[in-house]
Image: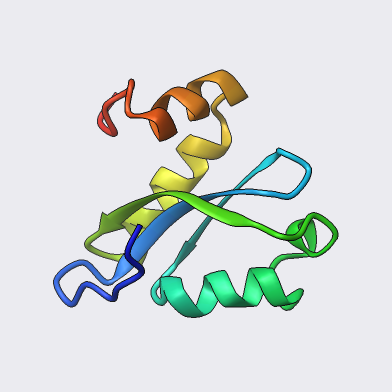
């Protein structure tokens, strides 16, 4: 998965698979930097004790508000549904 900054859609919703197998869902406007923060222990409190983390999914969003709405939606999903999204068996719109 390429970590790039998309000028047209500067906000990302992302899913990390933590070292313990759990998922972490977040948003950022700099995916590369935020990923490095998570793996260095400077990211979210949740990921600090669950390193290393691996980026397994990302979506581009046009603004922070849309990204935050999607983050909240994904955080409400059960693990199985997140796994289907990551695997490509579930469309992002579903």
- Report the residue that reaches farthest toward the left: 8
Q: Position of residue 28 (x, y in %)?
A: 45, 68
Residue 80 in the image: above or below residue 35 = above
Q: Which residue is depicted at the point 40% across and 29% down? A: 87
> What colour scheme has been applied to the protein in the rendered image?
rainbow
Choose top left, top right, bottom left or bottom right for residue 32. bottom left
Q: Residue furthest right?
A: 49
Where on the picture, by quarter, is residue 39?
bottom right
Image quadrant containing the C terminus: top left
- Residue 22 percent across, percent down from the top left: 70, 39
Q: Residue at x 35, y 57 (%)?
A: 1
The one nearer the camera, 93 or 22, is 22
**Residue at 39% over, 74% down:** 29
On screen, residue 39 versus residue 77, left or right, reads right
On the rendered structure, is 50 left or right of 43?
Answer: right
Q: Is residue 56 above or below residue 76?
A: below
Asked if 67 appears above or below 75 in the picture, the reply is below
| Closer to the camera in the image, 15 or 93 | 15
The number of numbered badges drawn on the structure is 0
Q: Is 30 positioned to the left or the right of 89 in the image?
A: right
Residue 60: percent from left, percent from top: 27, 57
Write the residue at 21% across / 66% down.
9
């Amino acid at each position: 998965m390429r970590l790039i900054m998309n000028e047209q859609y500067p906000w990302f919703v992302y899913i990390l698979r933590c070292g313990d197998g759990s998922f972490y869902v977040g948003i950022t406007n700099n995916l590369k930097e935020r990923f490095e923060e998570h793996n260095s222990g400077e990211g979210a409190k949740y990921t600090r004790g669950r390193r290393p983390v691996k980026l397994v999914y990302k979506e581009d969003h046009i603004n922070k508000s849309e990204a935050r709405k999607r983050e909240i939606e994904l955080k409400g999903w059960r693990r199985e549904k997140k796994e289907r999204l990551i695997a490509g068996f579930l469309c992002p719109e579903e």
